[in-house]
Image (tube, rainbow, N blue to C red):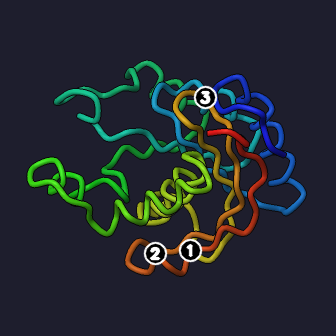
């Protein structure tokens, strides 16, 4: 499915397609990118095992956590596992770029994945991050849900590999994504 435009207007339809495809393939684990928690709330209760990956603390401002504590508590009470950590493709390489300029391997990988859209890049990234954190099982396909800013407009079936074997990661299916991004 290709959405005519990117953005949060696709969230409900993206979630519906992701849940449907996970059911068809017997996939028990879904990983969602959600900074405010709104997209994770919409997915909670619709899938067996939900992992929500947020921006790291300090992403927007030093010491600031974009997801309010009350939302974290609500999601946890609904069985959602939360992961807040440094982004796979934005850690030390980004710090070096910000300080000294230039482009580094993780950023080249991220930009290459963005050829397919920001959401596809995020789906790959959060799947590997969740695997590295031990929140999803190794060797199992997951459905990943992400967006191009706020909300969700992309879903994919991914077989993630740990970061130290990143290139063994396989994007098995792109369930939906914006055509224009």
Determine which residue is flagged by label 2. 166
Residue depicted at x 64% and y 34%: 152
Residue 52 location (% of width, % of height) = 53, 42
Q: Is residue 18 left or right of residue 163?
A: right
Q: Position of residue 23 (x, y in %)?
A: 86, 53
Circle 1: element type = loop
The mark nearer the N terminus, 3 or 1, is 3
Q: Is residue 75 above or below residue 28?
A: above
| Cβ atoms under marks 2 and 3 closer than 8 Å | no
Badge 3 density bin: few <14, some 14–19, many ≥20, Cα 10 Å: many
In three-dimensional space, the C-alpha distance between marks 1 and 2, rounded to whole angstroms, equals 6 Å
Query: Total marks drawn?
Result: 3
Pointer 2 or 3: first along the chain: 3
Q: Nearer the viewer, residue 58 or 175?
A: 175
Which of the numbered marks, if any, corresponds to residue 151? 3
Residue 162: x %, y % from top left: 45, 73
In the image, 35 versus 93, the foreground residue is 93
Q: Quadrant of residue 79?
A: top right
Residue 169: numbered disc: 1
How far apart are labels 2 and 3 at the CA level?
Answer: 26 Å
SS at mark 2? helix
Residue at 58% across, 24% down: 38
**How far is mark 3 from mark 1, CA to CA?**
25 Å
User: Looking at the image, is 103 positioned above or below residue 181?
Assistant: below
Lateral position of residue 161 relative to residue 178, left or right: left
């Amino acid at each position: 499915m290709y959405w005519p435009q990117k953005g949060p207007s696709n969230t409900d339809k993206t979630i519906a397609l992701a849940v449907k495809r996970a059911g068809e393939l017997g996939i028990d684990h879904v990983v969602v990118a959600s900074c405010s928690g709104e997209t994770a709330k919409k997915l909670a209760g619709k899938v067996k095992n939900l992992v929500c990956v947020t921006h790291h603390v300090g992403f927007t401002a030093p010491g600031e956590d974009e997801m309010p504590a009350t939302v974290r508590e609500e999601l946890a009470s609904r069985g959602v596992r939360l992961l807040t950590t440094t982004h796979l493709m934005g850690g030390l390489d980004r710090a070096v770029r910000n300080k000294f300029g230039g482009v580094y391997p993780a950023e080249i990988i991220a930009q290459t994945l963005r050829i397919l859209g920001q959401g596809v890049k995020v789906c790959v990234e959060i799947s590997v991050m969740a695997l590295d954190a031990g929140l999803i099982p190794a060797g199992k396909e997951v459905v990943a849900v992400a967006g191009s800013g706020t909300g969700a407009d992309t879903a994919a079936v991914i077989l993630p590999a740990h970061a130290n074997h990143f290139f063994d990661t396989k994007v098995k299916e792109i369930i939906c994504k914006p055509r224009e991004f």
